[in-house]
Image (cartoon, grey):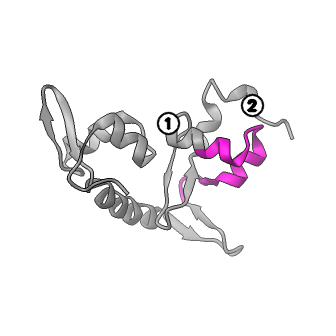
Amino acid sequence: MPDDRKLLTAKEFARLAGVKPGTVTNWLRNGRLEGSKSNGRWMIPADQLNKMGSKASTESQEKMQDTPSGKTQSRETKMYSIAEFAAITYLTELGVERWLKSGRLNGNLDENGTWRVDPSSLQLPHLKHLLRNS
């Protein structure tokens, strides 16, 4: 867990939160995250990761519904677990997790702290050659 007194750049925050830096910038501009500009760069207190997580959890709970099979599914699109995403690509589960953390895949942490992969990741140019045909 990061030191709560530490300040993170938008890029660092995005990497730790599992989102794109542009998303973090939008959150800062819209007031969803607290931060300030220093020398033209957004600086965000590390404790905002916890606050962002609870806001993301609330939003995901609003978007999610339980299906008869017991799996949680989004009304908009299904988010993949790491194992599910690994099964439809040639990436290992560890590889999927690393790509999520580095921002090479679109996804986020759910309310339980489990990574979920956004289906839009399947359309990323650097992933297309890694898709299984089955």
Magenta stretch containing residue 107, yes or no? Answer: no
Q: Quadrant of the C terminus?
A: top right
Residue visible at 17% across and 45% down in the picture: 35
Pinpoint residue 96: horizontal percent, then vertical percent: 64, 43
Pinpoint residue 129: horizontal percent, then vertical percent: 74, 26
Badge 2 element:
helix
Residue 63's label in the rendered image is none
Task: Give whichever of 62, 112 is nearer the camera.
Answer: 112
- Relative to 113, does residue 31 appear above or below in the rendering? above
Q: Is residue 13 left or right of residue 120?
A: left
Residue type at the position of mark 2: Leu
Q: Is residue 2 left or right of residue 85?
A: left
Q: Quadrant of the N terminus?
A: bottom left
Pinpoint residue 85: horizontal percent, then vertical percent: 69, 47
Measure how far apart labels 2 and 1 are at the Cα level. Answer: 17 Å
Q: Is residue 86 left or right of residue 13?
A: right
Label 1: how many residues lie within 10 Å, few (<14), some (14-19) or many (20+)?
A: many
Task: Give whichever of 70, 57 is nearer the camera.
Answer: 57
Label 2: how many residues lie within 10 Å, few (<14), some (14-19) or many (20+)?
A: some
Q: Earlier in the sequence, mark 2 or mark 1?
A: 1
The residue that label 1 is drawn on is 103
Badge 1 element:
loop
Count the marks: 2
Residues rendered magenta in the picture: 75-97
Residue type at the position of mark 1: Gly
Magenta stretch containing residue 89, yes or no? Answer: yes
Pinpoint residue 17: horizontal percent, then vertical percent: 41, 48
Please say if the residues under marks 2 and 1 sit with CB atoms less than 8 Å apart.
no
Residue visible at 47% across and 62% down in the picture: 63
The residue that label 2 is drawn on is 130
Q: Is residue 29 left or right of residue 80?
A: left
